Amino acid sequence: MQAPEALARLAEDYLACIELTPDLGAQQDSMRYALEGGKRIRAVICLATAEAAGGKPEVALPAAAALELVHAFSLVHDDLPALDDDDERRGRPSAHIAFPEGIALLAGDALLVEAFRLALSYPATGPARELAEATLGMIGGQYLDITGTTDDLAELHRLKTGRLFAASVGLGLQAAGVPPAEQAPWRAFGEELGLLFQIVDDVLDGDGYAERLGADGARALVRAAADRATTALDAIPAGTEILQEIVDGLVVRTA
Amino acid sequence: MQAPEALARLAEDYLACIELTPDLGAQQDSMRYALEGGKRIRAVICLATAEAAGGKPEVALPAAAALELVHAFSLVHDDLPALDDDDERRGRPSAHIAFPEGIALLAGDALLVEAFRLALSYPATGPARELAEATLGMIGGQYLDITGTTDDLAELHRLKTGRLFAASVGLGLQAAGVPPAEQAPWRAFGEELGLLFQIVDDVLDGDGYAERLGADGARALVRAAADRATTALDAIPAGTEILQEIVDGLVVRTA
């Protein structure tokens, strides 16, 4: 079993050498720029799930990369002036600052489609279908967020962040060939993991749950979510210690 | 065999009742707005190809709709201020005029992903793979267009318009279950059809080829492209009279 750090390097190396569609020409530069510098947590979850489920992490690399491309697409578009209007991302100028805004817009579009091309490198339609459904949920969450049309923070988080986290587990299962009938306990873990990540994120950013409950209240929520994630992991009949390490790593960030 | 007008109505009815992902909530309104009012030529080509190849047009409806959703996505994003900055589309306010710009941006994203969800309703990955590759080519063409980095109008058109036209034939073939070994003459027709459409479009808009060659020169190019499309059709061992009607219909628009 490879540690989360080793899996992150595996994903990083794969993303660094990823072949984009030649027809994109120099548009590729902005896409590679937008892909640089992430923590690759979604990829790591996908690879760790595949390995825990008995597959080689390598079989899950295209799926793991697809998740990171969808994540990068969402950041590029969310940062645009028409949405969050953020000039900085991952400690550097956002894509639309480093490149003309129109090029950044197209970079997001192309990252999204390249993600599907990667997910479609598997023989079955399952991985790409799950990626599409998760991405649509994520867009629905972004819609709720920018329009302020809901007070239900849990629902907003479940869509905007949770769907892609749950899909990170789901694509790992599909890449490893876990039969649908055996996926339920893994998927229950994926749901808890997404919620945990979002509460941790709120604590670090001081918004969302941290704003509503205060720092101590949100930290108590982190512990409760981590406990539920661990309980979900314990229900999986496989060696899930790396996934537990990922859970513990998230909690440590808020300690 | 159904006439192009009947196929267009079939596509229109399907699009009017299309089920979008419930998680998108009220974001669906902007997507449906952006979908309204097209001529559905890509859908008609897809349905006519499927029927000419021996399938029922109905089996190609999800593929035909997917093509129209990708087309609608591209229009919504191309109209945004960061790209072409067009306030009008199909005789109505563009999506980012009718809705806040951020909502229009997300509408484009969601239309693109819903297109993949439709293409993924087929049992094999082929239709979605072809859609992804065509869409990436289209984005590469849009990049060439906005950056003005090429003088090669044929290459620009082949990517920006031609790839999705060729995929309209390709997805029709896949939906009808035409074996890959028998697809070559159909695909040759698809390439010619895309070029023909673009030259016709240039004549109607007075730009591109019409600007370079003058109206008469461009019209001569239309006739030559139509002749090549007809020659390509004649090489297909099937009843292609509806596809010929589509070719003739395009030429008539410039007469």
Image (cartoon, coloured by chain):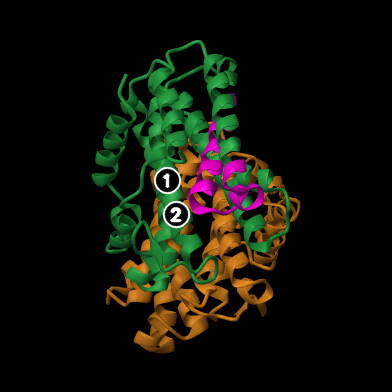
Chain colours: A green, B orange
For label 1, the residue is A115
Chain letter, disc 2 residue: A
In the rendered structure, which disc, 2 or 1, sits on the residue that comes first in sequence? Answer: 2
Q: Is residue A238 visible?
A: yes
Q: Residue at x 31, y 27 (%)?
A: A58
Relative to the observer, which residue lies in front, B20 or B130?
B20
Cα distance between the residues tagged 2 and 1: 9 Å
Q: Residues within 10 Å of mark 2 (few under 14, many from 20)?
A: many
Q: Residue at x 70, y 54 (%)?
A: B15
Residue A73's disc is: 2
Measured from the top left, where is residue B31 in percent x and y?
A: 66, 60
Q: Is residue B74 magenta?
A: no
Q: Does residue B59 sit above or below B7 in this rendering?
A: above
Residue B253 picture location, percent across and down: 57, 77
Assess whether residue A190 is covered by the magenta stretch. Answer: yes
Q: Residue at x 56, y 39 (%)?
A: A219
Can you say which quadrant of the picture contains the C terminus of chain B?
Answer: bottom right
Q: Does any portion of residue B235 appear in the rendered image?
A: no
Left or right of residue A29, residue A133 in this image = right
Is there CB contact under 8 Å for labels 2 and 1? yes
Q: Amino acid at mark 1?
A: Ala
Q: Amino acid at mark 2?
A: Phe
Q: Secondary structure at mark 1?
A: helix
| Chain of the residue that carries numbered disc 1 in the rendered image | A
Location of residue A180 with respect to A26 vertically, above or below: above
Q: What range is drawn magenta here?
A: A188-217
Type of secondary structure dominating the magenta stretch: helix
